[in-house]
Image: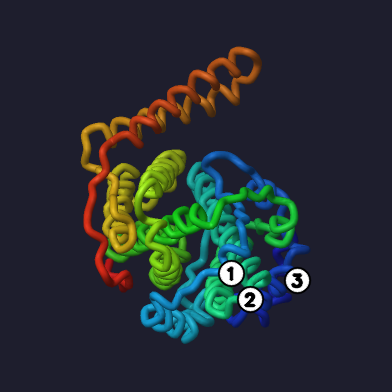
Amino acid sequence: MNVQNQGAYDGKHTADATTVEEGLAIQEEQAKYDDDFATETAMMNTLLTPRFYTTDFDELDALDVSSVREDWDKLIAQMESDPNKGHFKKNELWDHVDWDGMEPGLKKEFIDFLISSCTAEFSGCVLYKEMKRRGNNPDVVQLFQLMARDEARHAGFINDALREAGLRVNLGFLTQAKKYTYFRPKFIYYATYLSEKIGYARYITIFRHLEANPEHRFHPIFKWFEEWCNDEFSHGEAFALLMKTDPKLTQGKNVLWIKFFLTAVYATMYVRDHQRPAFHKALGVDPDWYAYEVFTKTSKLSEQIFPITLDIDHPAWQKNLELLQAANVQIAQAKAQGGIGGKLRQLVGSAKAGRAFVSLYLIPAKKHQVPASTRLEPAY
């Protein structure tokens, strides 16, 4: 990639875009400088990589938010005020990054982190933009337009950081070529709500840690995490209100689905983070400590709408997370080995992973009364 040409579009930046369409158009202009490696990495589909989702948009469009109108209008007004317009771009606080001098293991893991984060942000943008395009319900269309705007900015900002390393994800190509996973709307609510809330918990935990330990801030992007996670928080609030419009979504057999998504999201985060030891060492963070901090925050936040939380203090919780991680390592090694022996080792590793996940799921959940008022404000 010819990084010398990156200044050609300095006058146009996704941070200043007021609509998702404007933000994506800016990125499409820059696509000629994309890097195949970054885009191919973002295209990968595994159990641990971010996915693109599609759903029944007609069912989403039929939502009636009148039962949560007061909280809804407050949230929409807050998002419309656009407190982060112009924020997600490099300024005088952006320190020089010595990519060539960065320790190779850290560089590899950090680039993987950035590409994964960019893909995750953009997957939300694609889903929200499609709902805005297809919908006729003014409340729902407005919400998804605002959320798509935010996610496009986040993805564009991460791409700016990648561009300094000579990489960039072709987001337009991802829209057309990446495999889409169909989820029923209620599963979209559970998965996306948790994605936004755990995203908030992850970013604010890192931000507060580096605020207290600035010597571990090895890249300037972490300085932007507070405002970033507050966008994630607002998006989670929106999905909490969407779920509150239909009490059945958090009652009866659906509680089993809530428990499944909680377990899956927590377990995926744990395994994925343990694949980046150099990244967490550079941050001065123990992955097990970090996981517990994020799980604790996310569980507390999810009490606003979910009637259960996972018992992360149960003796079997950490044990089975470690078994799941060990199984994931075995699967990766078996894939690298190849051949019949590698295939057999993959099957054994997959069986171990499945058993560990089922054991996590079967740990009794903690029940609580969902509060009458759903709305929360960032407090960490």
Is mark 1 in CB contact (under 8 Å) with mark 2? yes
Vertical placement of 128 versus 348: above or below?
A: below
- Mark 3 is on which residue type? Glu
Q: Earlier in the sequence, mark 1 or mark 3?
A: 3
Q: Quick check: 288 above or below 223?
A: above
Mark positioned earlier in the residue sequence (3 or 2): 3
Residue at screen point 60% across, 20% down: 337
Which residue does the image show at 42% across and 68% down from the upper left?
A: 245
For the residues labelled 3 and 2, the Cα–Cα distance comes to: 30 Å
Q: Residue shown at 46%/81% (left/top)? A: 76
Image quarter (top left, top right, bottom left or bottom right) of the C terminus: bottom left
Q: Kindly state the secondary structure of the residue where label 2 is placed.
A: loop
Q: Which residue is mark 2?
A: 136
Which of labels 3 and 2 is toward the front? Answer: 2
Q: Residue 332: which quarter of the image?
A: top right
Q: Which residue is mark 1?
A: 61
Three-letter code for the amino acid on which mark 2 is drawn: Asn
Give the foreground label among 1 and 3.
Answer: 1
Circle 3 sits on which residue?
29
| First reached walking from the N terminus: tag 1 or tag 2 | 1
